Amino acid sequence: MNGIILSIGDELVLGQTVDTNSAWISVKLASLGVRVVQHVTVADQLDAIRDAIIAAAELCDVLVISGGLGPTADDVTRQALAAAMNVDMELNGGWLATIEQFFQQRGRSMPEINRVQAMIPRGAKCIENTCGTAAGIAARLARTGGGTCQVYVVPGVPSEMKAMLELSVLPVLAERLGGAKILSRVLHTFGLGESAVAEMLGDLMDRRRNPSVGTTVSNGLVSIRVNSSAASSERAREMLEQTAAACRVALGDLIFGEGDQSLASAVGELLMKNRDRVAQMATAESCTGGLLAKMLTDTPGSSRYFRGGWVTYANESKIQWLGVPAELIEKHGAVSEPVVLAMADGAKKIAGADYALAISGVAGPDGGTPEKPVGTVCIALAGATGSRAMTFKFPGTRDWIRNRSALMALSMLRYDILGRVMPR
Amino acid sequence: MNGIILSIGDELVLGQTVDTNSAWISVKLASLGVRVVQHVTVADQLDAIRDAIIAAAELCDVLVISGGLGPTADDVTRQALAAAMNVDMELNGGWLATIEQFFQQRGRSMPEINRVQAMIPRGAKCIENTCGTAAGIAARLARTGGGTCQVYVVPGVPSEMKAMLELSVLPVLAERLGGAKILSRVLHTFGLGESAVAEMLGDLMDRRRNPSVGTTVSNGLVSIRVNSSAASSERAREMLEQTAAACRVALGDLIFGEGDQSLASAVGELLMKNRDRVAQMATAESCTGGLLAKMLTDTPGSSRYFRGGWVTYANESKIQWLGVPAELIEKHGAVSEPVVLAMADGAKKIAGADYALAISGVAGPDGGTPEKPVGTVCIALAGATGSRAMTFKFPGTRDWIRNRSALMALSMLRYDILGRVMPR
């Protein structure tokens, strides 16, 4: 069973608003076993909407349309659906009464322009809106190739759209489809490129496989998506578990977490699992300028293991706050392994922590030299068994270099706690 | 001239990732006078992509496709474009050499699977990728109804997509279209809500006005978008300048910058404009956990005015690193005006800075009390003329509260340097 999501709105095609509805609706439909094959967005124009409805109906069994149900002249989704169905519009007396009541309860009489919100194509049904005056619409469109496409029109306002789908559309669909049949899981890795991860996954990534395994790159992480589809939700879950386990075997330590988990929160969990008491950490940052600490404190409850940190952006800060010997900076430069080692050691000692991470690098766009070009970053970890530093050359923009540096520091700590060698 | 944006990816149609690329690309195309009429998203499936390309090409003059250029088996946009063009794929020797060099520079040899990233449809051209190994593709598709559609394929990774369009695609398009005829300017404000800003703008926001003036809220800022449309780019620019100037008159100090400028970089510019020498600042953060320092160091060259900062997440860190009296924390709590004042004073003194900002608050979701619920944030500014603190109650999630806190601290410093009273 295939689904398409059609979003209506000038602000969407003009790029003034990012469409978040389609993703939300897709997740809901997928969980019911509807395979969403397309998202389409068109402007508030009757002909464009009508053509998009007709084209989509030919390609799917369930079409969810959001937007264009307001009372103003630029809201024409109702009319476009009627045109696609080749029928007239008619007034739904029941819903008109509901709208009038909606205004009465607020001590006002219904403005005349709201009357159009009770008009629906002949042969269609109203879907109740518990949050607003726009009725949703349920209709069926015959396909030229035979069969029918079930159409649901819902408001574009996210809160109204979600309420209407949750309360009135998804339960009906779920009953008809007999429960969830497509399940997903996302596993996150850091440290190797997408192609290296794919090589390790091998045949698991075969396109014909079910559950399917795919990779995506986002914010420096390579994530593995496992999608399982089966006749029953139990079977889908079982298959999902098996494939996720196979991915874990193939990738080993490279997987640091799944779902909403970040690399920083995964490190936090390891620190809390420390044998006798929660291990404590601190940070000392130069080029990342607080990003590493920010990532750590994105996680609620990080105060249990994160003492705090220093953003020693100026050389004097490194010297005065962390006790980095001035000679070290003079001799090796602020971006050097001896200096980050001194930063990490200083941070660990002053904070009374078990671990400290220090970062100093050339984030650019200026400040590069032939010897230390933009992207040169030194990272040090001071830990239970001594300190060590590594030097990296990261490509890309300032943002990218800073993001990559902070993630790499977290990864160094993670592998150190795991007692494993970090892959490079 | 019509445009369509086609996004490719299982993660998009499944709703696991929200498509932000299409909105970004739409804004860029609109600025060149290309009217985007549709966004379409399809899964990583050769037939579906091919069909979507053919259908879109019939409806537009410019088709931008993003995604599906990775090296792995699930990336099939290249092949789908070749199928739509009805041609074979061929190896682009020049780009293959570029990929091999990319890996060489990182001390590795190119994995065999990356070879596919140098394959493009016969008759198409490579577009340079300055951030990754996937070449973009430029091609032309003949339409059955006559004419051709210009196709650009760019990576789905937002940073690579943006760099490729900015550097290699948009300039070419702009030249072909005879320069921009729709010009935009974005002015940024912080401190008042969208409706208050709209009231101050008054008639400037009339829907029928050209240049049009609209407001958008994003990341805690209210931005004013001015769109000017005219028969020539000169005229459009002239009209744009006039309306932007009128907005500046209406909003005064509330506007801190425009375009890519951030509140942090605006503060940095004010510090550098200090009379005798560049003023120096420092930060002391608790609940924002480094975010304020991160915002300041997002700006290249911020080392000229930013000494550095402390992330004093634990109470002991506040006491030991910044000299906050332990009694103060005991008596008033870590989230209190006396404590942030002591943090700011300590940071200013230790850093030898002219200004210091300190933040301590309850970012949630836990840690709230009836007296100090989640969202309670104290911010202090230590400056040339003494120190002062304010307490805020911010609504929203942990991320939102942290973001708002850091921005508010910057805003306090900005108004202090300007010698004006901050609106609340």
Image (cartoon, coloured by chain):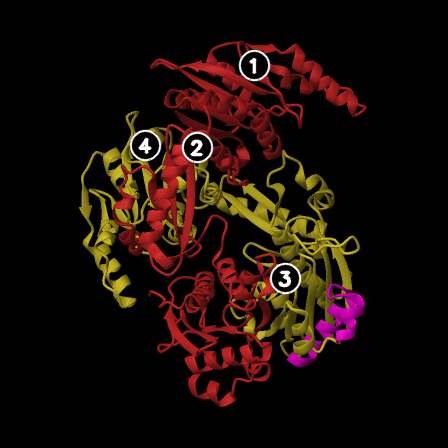
Chain colours: A red, B yellow
Residue A280 horizontal/vertical position (percent): 56, 70
- Tell me the crowding category of disc 3: few under 14, some 14 to 19, or many 20 or more residues within 10 angstroms, Cα based: many
For label 4, the residue is B48
Task: Indicate which disc residue A39 carries.
Answer: 2
Q: Chain of mark 4?
A: B
Q: Are marks 1 and 3 on the same chain?
A: no
Q: Are marks 2 and 3 in contact (CB under 8 Å)?
A: no
Q: Nearer the viewer, mark 2 or mark 3?
A: 3
Q: Whole-Å distance between the Cαs marked 2 and 1?
A: 24 Å
In magenta, the rendered stretch is B326-351
- Residue extending furthest toward the bottom: A327
Q: Establish whether labels 2 and 4 are both on one chain.
A: no
Q: Which residue is mark 1?
A: A125
In which quadrant of the rendered image does the N terminus of chain A lie? top left
Q: Amino acid at mark 3?
A: Thr
Task: Find the residue positioned furthest to the front.
Answer: A276
Residue B288 is marked as 3
Residue name at image x 67 percent, y 78 percent: B320
What amino acid type is highlighted by mark number 2? His
Mark 1 residue element: strand
The amino acid at mark 4 is Ala
Image quadrant occupied by the C terminus of chain A: bottom left
Chain letter for mark 1, please.
Answer: A
Q: Position of residue B391 (x, y in %)?
A: 77, 59
Along the viewing direction, whichever of B158 and A336 lies nearer the viewer: A336
Disc 4 from disc 1: Cα separation: 32 Å
Give the secondary structure at mark 2. Answer: strand
Residue B295 visible in image: yes
